[in-house]
Amino acid sequence: LLSKLNAKEPPVDLSKVVSLWPNLFLTESELDGAGYLLPIGELGAEILVNRADVEERKRFTVAHELGHWVLGLTLKKKYGHFSQPKDAHYVEVERWCDRFATNLLMPEFMIKSSITLAGSKTFIECLMRAASEFKVSDSAIFIRVWELLRVQVALISLRRVNGRNVALLDKSFADAEADAALRTVLKLSNFVEGIM
């Protein structure tokens, strides 16, 4: 999809992706959920997105529903009718569509070229501007940076507990092993009196 659009830098233009199929439409509406893919006839569909969601959420929803669209087209080609996989569990299909959305919105080549030490920008500066460049949430970019670059982003707060300075790991965007290693480093650090 990205090569068809000649997409080389963020953000990926989802309206152009949707326009690759003349019978696929995108509509914002008042919804109970984030969004849905509604097949509307022979190789046509409408992606409905909750208009109340923030822009980053809408973009992820559109990309996720495009995943359902691509799955449906793949099964149409294989079996002759548009549907979602019947032999896969619902959760597996949803995870696949989430991965599709992640790869569409934050493709590896764009992440690696955008988050670098090139020029006068530091890695931290590149990382902090990446979410707005890609038009995704901070959490999404931090998770993707861990997946692709193995750079752990963590939110650590220093608090006073029982008269001692304590560093607390509030949120981490890495795996459990990396979190455990970070906790060990925090406990061994000399810059605080005590670590929880």
Image (spheres, rainbow, N blue to C red):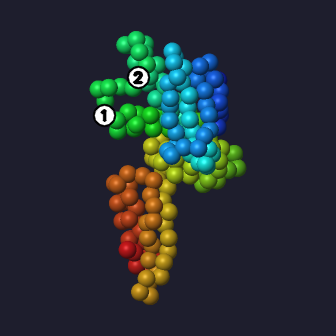
Instruction: Assess disc 2: are there few (<14), some (14-19) or many (≥20) residues with their C-alpha within 10 Å of its C-alpha.
Output: some
Element type at marker 2? loop
The numbered mark at residue 83 is 2
> Residue at coordinates 50% horizontally, 31% vertically from top-left?
37
Q: Tell me the amino acid under the disc marked 1.
A: His
> Residue at coordinates 45% horizontally, 73% vertically from top-left?
167
Viewer-closest of 57 and 53: 53
* Residue extending furthest toward the right: 120
Q: Tell me the amino acid under the disc marked 2.
A: Ser
Can residue 166 be seen in the rendering of this structure?
A: yes
Q: Is residue 85 above or below residue 10?
A: above
Is 44 on the left or on the right of 83, as rendered?
A: right
Q: In terms of image quadrants, where is residue 24? A: top right
Q: CA distance from mark 2 to mark 1?
A: 14 Å
Q: Quadrant of the C terminus?
A: bottom left
Residue 171 drawn at (x, y percent): 45, 61
